[in-house]
């Protein structure tokens, strides 16, 4: 029997944020924050946890900056700050989740 991930429940509150839809890539695939963080080589749950600990305005600015640095497919989307605001609203208020 495989060992259970002891952090899985603790990180479950971040899942809605990480799998939220940012847009559609040119190949038709849905782009999510999870895929953006993973492509950059970051631990998606760690990055989401860091954003959850920030004030909402700070998290929106940080996430919008992150999205601006993602390959050109994301930069083509309108208003990254609006996208970041929508996504940050999905973060749990309790940063330990």
Image: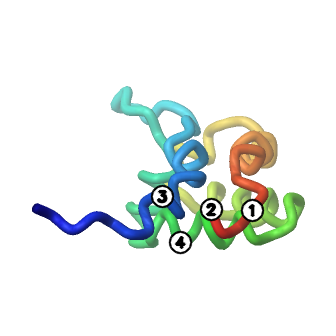
Specify which label sits upstream in the sequence, 3 or 1. 3
How far is mark 3 from mark 4, CA to CA? Answer: 14 Å
In this picture, is 80 found above or below 41? above
* Disc 2 packing (10 Å; few <14; some 14–19; many ≥20): some
In this picture, is 64 found above or below 50? above
State yes or no: discs 3 and 4 in contact (Cβ < 8 Å).
no
Based on the displayed image, in which of its 4 quarters is residue 83 positioned?
A: top right
Quarter of the image with the N terminus is bottom left
Q: Which residue is mark 2?
A: 97
Q: Is residue 51 left or right of residue 10?
A: right
Which numbered disc covers residue 94?
1
Specify which label sits upstream in the sequence, 4 or 2. 4
Mark 2: which secondary structure? loop
How far is mark 4 from mark 2, CA to CA? Answer: 11 Å
Nearer to us in this view, 30 or 8: 8
Q: Which residue is mark 4?
A: 46
State yes or no: discs 4 and 2 in contact (Cβ < 8 Å).
no
Q: Give the mark toward the camera: 3 or 4.
A: 3
Q: Which residue is mark 3?
A: 9
Residue 36: x, y in percent? Answer: 47, 55
* Disc 3 packing (10 Å; few <14; some 14–19; many ≥20): few
How far is mark 4 from mark 1, CA to CA? Answer: 14 Å
In this picture, is 81 found above or below 25? below
State yes or no: discs 2 and 3 in contact (Cβ < 8 Å).
no
Residue at 89% x, 60% y is 57
State yes or no: discs 3 and 1 in contact (Cβ < 8 Å).
no
State yes or no: discs 2 and 1 in contact (Cβ < 8 Å).
yes
* Disc 1 packing (10 Å; few <14; some 14–19; many ≥20): few
Nearer to us in this view, 11 or 22: 11
């Amino acid at each position: 029997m495989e060992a259970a991930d002891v952090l899985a429940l603790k990180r479950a509150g971040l899942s809605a944020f990480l799998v939220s839809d940012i847009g559609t890539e040119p190949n038709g695939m849905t782009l999510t924050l999870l895929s953006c963080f993973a492509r950059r080589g970051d631990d998606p749950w760690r990055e989401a946890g860091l954003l959850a600990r920030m004030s909402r305005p700070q998290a929106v600015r940080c996430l919008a900056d992150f999205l601006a640095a993602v390959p050109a497919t994301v930069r083509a989307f309108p208003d990254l700050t609006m996208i970041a605001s929508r996504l940050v609203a999905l973060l749990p208020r309790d940063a330990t989740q």
